[in-house]
Image: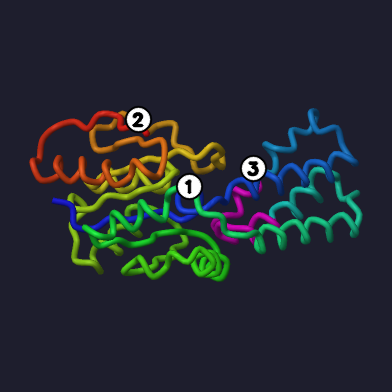
Amino acid sequence: MLELVGFDGDDTLWQSQDFYDAAQAEFERIVGAYVDLADVRVHDRLLAIESGNIHVFGYGAKGMTLSMIEAAFDITGGLISSGDLHRLVGIGKEVLAHPVELLPGIREAVEAVAANYRIVLITKGDLIHQQAKVKRSNLGDLFQRIEIVSEKDPAAYSRVLSEFGASPRDFVMVGNSLRSDIAPVVELGGWGIYMPYHSTWSLETDPHFAIDNPRVIQVGSADSIPAAVAQLDELATSGAGQPPTHSG
């Protein structure tokens, strides 16, 4: 039976990617004053630089800002002005200061799950920024533990489960990212509740993971989460069965 339920933070509990999308749009507008956006494939080049910098800067707005500065200098051949570079810094600060807006029904869903299971918040990114978002969300007190990790991979989940004294087969993770929230947990033998967000960073997708995996339920809204947890609990207890897609 399930003993522990994990929740992702960004775009599962509260909005996040929208602010990064707006930052990228502004980045392209600034760089577009120097180059032909179509010819230089600005989006792809920024994504490649961000991907290469993750192991140095980590995830989050600060790493994004440094990558935008590097990409802007590279794409414009060093022609970008100091004033526009300063504007890129300002974009990063705006993302760091954005308000925390909970997804519809998520508080009620977390409270309902917490009434029957131990719950843990597992999020990744910049420590200070993530701590601030947890505080502004007013959800922190619902969780037995807040885990802010540099990467969500099998090793990170194994550590969290070990510290809770829980087995992967007794754990379900709720999140919007197949790459970070679902695939590594299923790889360990756990369960996943996939709640797609309307916008997902390209580096958080996982084209090799099939969402019709029998250990995963897909939901369309937060109010479907408690029922999905209960359904997976039945499957975990029985040790058999294939969960159908759960829509809501």
Q: Nearer the viewer, residue 115 or 53?
A: 115
Is residue 59 toward the left or the right of residue 39 in the image? left
Picture layout, residue 129 above or below residue 9: below
Q: Position of residue 74 (x, y in %)?
A: 79, 47
Callout 1: helix, strand or loop? Answer: loop
Q: Is residue 61 magenta?
A: yes
Q: Which mark is residue 104?
A: 1
Q: Position of residue 146 (x, y in %)?
A: 39, 67
Magenta highlight range = 48-66
Residue beneath the point at 70% across and 57% down? 65
Residue beneath the point at 74% across and 33% down? 41
Callout 2: helix, strand or loop? Answer: loop
What amino acid is labelled 1 in the image?
Pro
Q: Position of residue 243 (x, y in %)?
A: 22, 32
Q: Which mark is residue 210?
A: 2
Q: Which one is in front in this view, the residue at disc 3 or the one at disc 1? A: 1
Picture layout, residue 85 above or below residue 191: below
Is residue 12 toward the left or the right of residue 21 in the image? left
What is the spatial separation of the Cα atoms under label 3 and label 2, in whole angstroms?
Answer: 24 Å
Residue 215 placement: quadrant:
top left
Is residue 98 toward the left or the right of residue 28 in the image? left
